[in-house]
Image: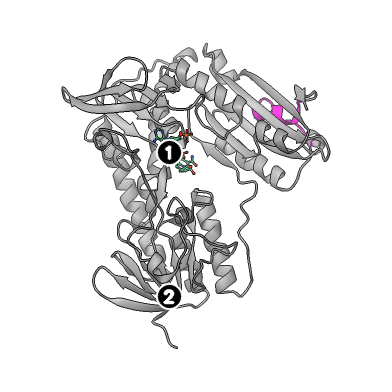
């Protein structure tokens, strides 16, 4: 049978674009359909604009610090529309880069919604149908609003980058990556932030000591973090919203922001009709080669809900191309993925939390917490944390957790050592870089706990 293409990719985000480009580089005939903007969540409504907002929000603290170092500087007003417009101009530029990357690699693109008609056929919203030997679904995910009265009044992360004006007050609902990052960003931009999290401590699943410290710092920086609290009801009121919490007083906010998780975008793709299996949250079920229950159809990225991070989607794309187009069976390695949460201060983490490691085997914990030199000089009280969780049996570092300005940059480096299987003694053999915060990672002599 002859096909129109060797590969048809659905979705032009980080994973889809990488797979299309690299597959085309092997000489394959490749097409890609994207219904929205090229670059996907990461570039258009996620990591990239979020990080620009993190930078924007850090200036008031930087300026306070600068004063303590002798500079005459004052944070004047923050011009949100000017910043927002500049940010969108940059996103437009990046979208152009993505389009050009595809064009230059010889990938044919369709600005249309695509659905599967059978195991080898894609039908576009324009009415055209194309056949392909392989189909790759990289359709990503989307934010969800919880099922509660008045939830339709809240915004989600997609909306935050397009606000006409910054609210004076906001309620952030949720305690995950997005909730905590935006609570810090908006607080830094001068918005009065309240955060409701239904559990006992924000950032569930991360190391307890690390998330405890971030939570303390968030509260110290002025965020009103209400734990064990959820929204019961939201009603429009006086140009804003009156929120009734599960306990405590009703309060009015200019805006309510739901950061209550994301869902794979699998609706409307025609997947069940052709035998692709979906999990409970709508995620596409795949094997270690990202292959679905239908052998010609593969899926990568957030649509599979394995580890929802851009660099992971990109690695899944590379492994897919290696397997399918280079004939080299390459399973995706999801072990020991370093990650950062861009709260203020940041968390950088790789491997197991102390709690998860203890559940597996006896460990030694090396941990130190101290005031960082730069902010301490300026009178700041925020602490940083450097922590290693070490296997008693093998001495391998099972987890490394950093809470500090720049922790994202630091954990990328520590991640190499942990991925290589470094032991505590390997860390100790490395000479300290002085004076830095991360030098503590190689100078901690005595465990603070064992067991
Ligand atoms: P998360 O799954 O991290 O967090 C969702 C939060 O919402 C949790 O605190 C959850 O509570 C809470 N929640 C869920 N349902 C409800 C409800 N009905 N009522 C109240 N609270 C609720 O999702 P995010 O949306 O924050 O992020 C999605 C993913 O995006 C992340 O897992 C991450 O993979 C990725 N991401 C990565 C970033 C990075 O690398 N820096 C940045 C942003 C996103 P509970 O804990 O009780 O379940």
Rendered view: 292 above or below 213: below
Quarter, ligand 1:
top left
Look at the image and tell me in which quarter the N terminus lies.
bottom left
Is-magenta flag for residue 160? no
Of 208 and 159, nearer the camera is 208
Q: How many marks?
A: 2
- Among the 4 quarters of the image, the one containing residue 96: bottom left
The numbered disc on residue 51 is: 1
**Which colour style is shown?**
one colour
For the residues marked 2 and 1, what is the alpha-carbon distance in whole angstroms? 39 Å
* Residue 133 in the image, given as x and y percentages of width and height: 46, 78
Mark 2 burial class by Cα count in 10 Å: few <14, some 14-19, many 20+: some
The residue sitting at 51% across, 25% down in the picture is 201
Main structural element of the magenta stretch: helix, strand or loop? loop
Q: Residue furthest top?
A: 379
Which numbered tag is attached to residue 199? none
Magenta highlight range: 430-444
Residue shown at 78% from the left, 27% from the top? 451
**Viewer-proximal residue among 77 and 298:** 298
Q: Residues within 10 Å of mark 1 (few under 14, many from 20)?
A: some
Residue at the disc numbered 2: 119
Tell me the element at label 2: loop
Left or right: residue 156 versus residue 442 is: left
**Viewer-proximal residue among 168 and 57:** 168
Is residue 406 among the parts visible in the rendering? Answer: no
Above-or-below relation of 381 to 358:
above
As helix, strand or loop, the secondary structure at mark 1 comes to helix
Circle 2 or circle 1, nearest the eye: 2
Q: Residue at point 59% right, 74% down?
A: 326
Which residue is farthest left? 238
């Amino acid at each position: 049978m002859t096909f129109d293409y060797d590969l048809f990719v659905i979705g032009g985000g980080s994973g889809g674009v990488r797979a299309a480009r690299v597959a085309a580089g092997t000489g394959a005939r490749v097409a890609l359909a994207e219904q929205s903007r090229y670059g996907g969540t990461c570039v258009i409504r996620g990591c990239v604009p979020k990080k620009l907002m993190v930078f924007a929000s850090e200036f008031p603290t930087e300026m306070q610090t600068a004063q303590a170092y002798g500079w005459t500087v004052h944070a004047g007003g923050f011009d949100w529309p000017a910043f927002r417009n500049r940010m969108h101009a940059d996103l437009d530029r990046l979208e152009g880069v993505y389009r050009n990357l595809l064009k230059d690699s010889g990938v044919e693109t369709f600005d249309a919604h695509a659905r599967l008609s059978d195991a080898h056929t894609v039908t576009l919203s324009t009415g055209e149908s194309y056949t392909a030997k392989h189909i790759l679904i990289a359709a990503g995910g989307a934010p969800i609003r919880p099922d509660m009265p008045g939830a339709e009044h809240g915004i989600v992360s997609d909306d935050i980058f397009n606000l006409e004006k910054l609210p004076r007050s906001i309620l952030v609902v949720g305690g995950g990556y997005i909730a905590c990052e935006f609570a810090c960003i908006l607080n830094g931009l001068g918005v009065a932030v309240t955060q409701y999290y239904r559990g006992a401590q924000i950032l569930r699943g991360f190391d307890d000591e690390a998330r405890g410290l971030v939570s303390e710092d968030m509260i110290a920086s002025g965020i009103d973090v209400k734990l064990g609290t959820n929204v019961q009801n939201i009603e429009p009121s006086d140009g804003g919203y009156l929120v009734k919490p599960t306990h405590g007083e009703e309060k009015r906010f200019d805006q309510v922001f739901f950061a209550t998780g994301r869902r794979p975008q699998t609706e409307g793709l025609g997947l069940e009709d052709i035998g692709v299996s979906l999990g409970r949250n709508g995620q596409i079920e795949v094997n270690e080669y990202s292959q679905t229950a239908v052998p010609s159809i593969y899926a990568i990225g957030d649509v599979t809900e394995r580890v929802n991070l851009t660099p992971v989607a990109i690695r899944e794309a590379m492994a897919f191309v290696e397997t399918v187009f280079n004939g080299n069976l390459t399973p995706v390695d999801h072990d020991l993925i370093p990650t950062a949460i861009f709260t203020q201060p940041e968390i950088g983490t790789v491997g197991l939390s102390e709690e998860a490691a203890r559940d597996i085997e006896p460990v030694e914990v090396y941990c130190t917490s101290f005031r960082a030199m730069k902010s301490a000089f300026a009178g700041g009280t925020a602490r940083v944390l450097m922590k290693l969780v070490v296997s008693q049996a093998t001495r391998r570092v099972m987890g490394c957790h950093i809470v500090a300005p720049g922790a994202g940059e630091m954990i990328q480096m520590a991640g190499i050592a942990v991925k290589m299987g470094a032991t505590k003694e390997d860390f100790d053999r490395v000479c300290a870089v002085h004076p830095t915060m991360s030098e503590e990672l190689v100078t901690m002599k005595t465990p603070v706990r064992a067991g």
